[in-house]
Amino acid sequence: MIDQAQRLRELVKEKSLHKGLDYNDEKAKIITVTSGKGGVGKSNFVVNLGITLQKMGKSVLIFDADVGMGNDDVLMGFLPKYNIYDIILYGKEIDDVVIEGPFGIRLLPGGSGLNKIDEIDDNKRKIFLEKLSSLKGFDFIIMDTGAGINKTVLGFIYCCQELIVITTPEPTSLTDAYSLVKAVTHFKIKSTAKVIINRVLDYKEGDMTFKKFNNAVLKFLNIKLEHLGNISEDRKLIKAVRNQKPFVIDYPNCEAAQDIKNIALKLCGDVNSNTGTGIQSLFKKIFSVFS
């Protein structure tokens, strides 16, 4: 079996990987959201960002790509019966698996089957991709990965157009985020990334944290970082999670919800100047990467 380092280097070098893939069937912005460690609020951010974008008139699909501990569904108050593996292997239809959430946002649960993609034959892949054709018209497809540094996370980072890294001001969180960015640059997967500082006490702490993090990256790594924004520490977030309700719905005027809105506005500005891809093209690339 090809080791991870060799495989990722090959993927970056394989320009032919992009040939034959239709990247213009839609104009969805493909975003991967990840973190160096767990417990930094990544999935909570993804769910609330997606709902905020949906409330702003954008069409959003969240792809829960956390192989082991996906919980976007729980944060939205759902418990799905199926995931994409049930579509691929057991003939389930898209409508059986995709969940419609608040304001019409869609959620596609990934499940543990993602790490068995290499076992799927070409015919099953073709049928699955044909079924995906019913999922159209998205402005954003947000992939929520697992935390940490492993082949699955790095693979999903490779598949996206834009990378968002979530961290907190805590030293351990920053160290792990730095290690993740270092791996991304080592394998030459991305040359740019956006950073969000979560659980800040005030804007000054978020700004100082990013500057400290960025200075270390500028000194030792070859990647350009952008400070996408901060999210305030807010007790209402804890209440919302316990109630299995996104805080942008239960507490739309809280400080954290306003922070999410500001981040969403920035992303909407970016999407207007970029040509994206569609869900079929994304999964063609995922199959290429993980096979």
Image (cartoon, grey):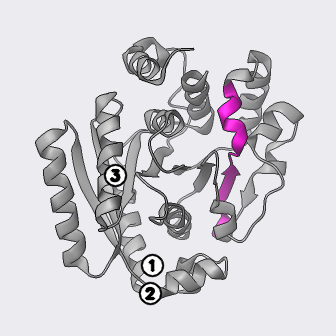
Quadrant in the picture for the C terminus = top right
Callouts 1 and 2 close, C-beta under 8 Å: yes
Amino acid at dot 2: Cys
Above or below, comparing residue 13 to residue 260 in the picture: above
The disc, 1 or 3, on the residue closer to the chain's N-terminal end is: 3
| In this view, the mark in front (1 or 3) | 3
Judged from the image, the secondary structure of the residue bearing numbered disc 1 is: helix
Q: Nearer the viewer, residue 170 or 208?
A: 170
Alpha carbon separation for disc pair 1 and 2: 5 Å
Quadrant in the picture for the N terminus = top right
Residue 263 relative to residue 92: left or right: left
Alpha carbon separation for disc pair 1 and 3: 24 Å
Q: Nearer the viewer, residue 49 or 116?
A: 116
The disc, 2 or 3, on the residue closer to the chain's N-terminal end is: 3
Judged from the image, the secondary structure of the residue bearing numbered disc 3 is: helix
Residue 42 falls within the magenta-colored stretch? no
Q: Which residue is mark 2?
A: 254
Label 2, residues with CA under 10 Å away: few <14, some 14-19, many ≥20: some
Q: Which residue is mark 1?
A: 257
Query: Which stretch did the figure color magenta?
Result: 103-117
**Residue 13 place in picture, x, y as percent:** 37, 15
Q: Nearer the viewer, residue 272 or 63?
A: 63
Residue farthest front in this picture: 172
Q: How many marks?
A: 3
The residue at 70%/50% (across/down) is 109
Amino acid at dot 1: Ala
**Residue 242 place in picture, x, y as percent:** 64, 81
- Residue 177's tag is 3
